[in-house]
Image (spheres, grey):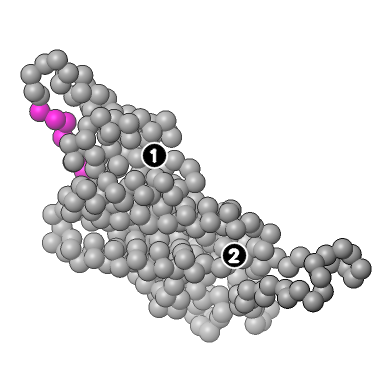
């Protein structure tokens, strides 16, 4: 698979976590009116979680600049970057600085501009070291752009692993912004985020040809995500082939195809790989040994 591929699942995840990290919390439910049947008054009430500090607009000009950047859905990635840079020059001490930098990260992702995405991402982390969205994006994108023969392969993969560990820790601390969200639903959101990180760790292991570690990571990713991710199952199929588990690889590839496949350049890489594995297993049964299929690079 080409290194320009960025999974749709990662984009969806970033959007969901952006809502968790940047939206103002809704007001808490009103207390029960006096006189209504309820728990005894003397019973101690559970303490409310500490409020998450929300950024505030300091001037009318700052608000207008923010509205121009975030309110116009027709902006191109280049236009967003230009407006963001203008904002940061005009309002260097804005409490929205991290959000504006993160908008530049997303714009670079849309442009497939990895070097600047990494640069802006590191600027976000300088301002907010536990920014889960940025940590997830960097931990999953770096291994996408790292080849097994790159001279700086180990440095880049080490960075990706470091970001992944930080991402998992940040996800654990993400506060529930909407008090109306049930604990079970919030756990699903956070588990989905964890699944994205584990998928990135699986790819790190694949580039290193550590197929057992890759298999375990992709299995964990699949178990955590809310929806079946066709890319994760496709890569799980490749990892299983690396471990010579061809029957299990076939099942993983079937799940990838059923979830929509991996469409690149008019082809479905998951469907192509499934056919190769099925052909191999068919030839292998009842015939002399044949060479196993050579899985493409992830």
In the image, is residue 292 part of the stretch drawn in magenta? Answer: yes
Q: Is residue 256 left or right of residue 212?
A: right
Residue farthest toward the right in the current orientation of the protein: 35
User: Viewer-proximal residue, 140 or 5?
Assistant: 140
Which mark, residue 69? none
Q: Residue at x 38, y 49 (%)?
A: 221
Q: Main secondary structure of the magenta part?
A: loop
Which comes sooner in the sequence, label 1 or label 2?
2
Q: Is residue 175 left or right of residue 219?
A: right
User: Viewer-proximal residue, 50 or 116?
Assistant: 50
Q: Is residue 254 above or below residue 91?
A: above
- The Cα–Cα distance between marks 1 and 2, rounded to whole angstroms, is 28 Å
Q: Quadrant of the C terminus?
A: top left
Indicate the secondary structure of the residue bearing disc 2. Answer: loop
Q: Give, as a single range, the part of the protein colored magenta.
A: 291-297
Q: Residue at x 44, y 68 (%)?
A: 170
Residue farthest toward the left in the current orientation of the protein: 288
Q: Residue at x 62, y 61 (%)?
A: 71
Crowding around mark 2 (Cα neighbors within 10 Å: few <14, some 14 to 19, many 20+) is some
Q: Is residue 191 left or right of residue 209?
A: right
Q: Quadrant of the N terminus?
A: top left
Residue at mark 2: 176
Indicate the secondary structure of the residue bearing disc 1. Answer: helix
Which mark, residue 230? 1
Residue 76 visible from this viewpoint: no
Residue farthest toward the bottom in the current orientation of the protein: 93
Q: Residue at x 35, y 54 (%)?
A: 198
User: Viewer-proximal residue, 233 or 62?
Assistant: 233
- Return the x and y of residue 56 as percentages of the image width and height: 64, 78
In the image, is residue 22 part of the stretch drawn in magenta? Answer: no
């Amino acid at each position: 698979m080409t290194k320009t591929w960025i999974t749709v699942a990662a984009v969806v995840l970033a959007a969901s976590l952006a809502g968790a990290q940047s939206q103002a919390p809704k007001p808490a439910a009103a207390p029960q009116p006096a006189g209504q049947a309820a728990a005894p008054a003397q019973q101690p009430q559970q303490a409310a979680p500490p409020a998450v500090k929300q950024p505030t607009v300091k001037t009318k000009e700052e608000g207008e600049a923010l509205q121009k950047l975030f309110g116009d859905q027709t902006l191109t990635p280049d236009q967003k970057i230009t407006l963001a840079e203008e904002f940061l020059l005009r309002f260097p001490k804005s409490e929205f600085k991290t959000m504006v930098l993160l908008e530049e990260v997303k714009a670079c992702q849309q442009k497939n501009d990895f070097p600047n995405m990494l640069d802006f991402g590191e600027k976000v982390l300088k301002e907010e070291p536990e920014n889960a969205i940025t940590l997830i994006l960097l931990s999953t994108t770096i291994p996408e752009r790292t080849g097994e023969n790159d001279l700086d392969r180990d440095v880049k993969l080490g960075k990706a692993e470091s970001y992944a560990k930080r991402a998992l820790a940040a996800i654990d601390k993400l506060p529930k912004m909407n008090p109306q969200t049930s604990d079970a639903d919030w756990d699903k959101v956070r588990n989905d985020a964890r699944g994205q990180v584990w998928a990135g760790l699986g790819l790190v292991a694949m580039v290193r040809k550590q197929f057992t570690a890759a298999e375990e990571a992709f299995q964990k990713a699949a178990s955590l995500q809310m929806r079946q991710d066709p890319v994760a199952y496709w890569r799980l199929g490749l990892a299983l082939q690396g471990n010579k588990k061809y029957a299990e690889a076939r099942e993983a590839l079937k799940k990838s195809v059923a979830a929509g496949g991996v469409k690149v350049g008019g082809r479905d890489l998951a469907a192509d790989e499934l056919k190769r594995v099925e052909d191999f297993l068919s030839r292998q049964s009842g015939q002399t040994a044949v060479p196993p299929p050579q899985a493409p690079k992830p």
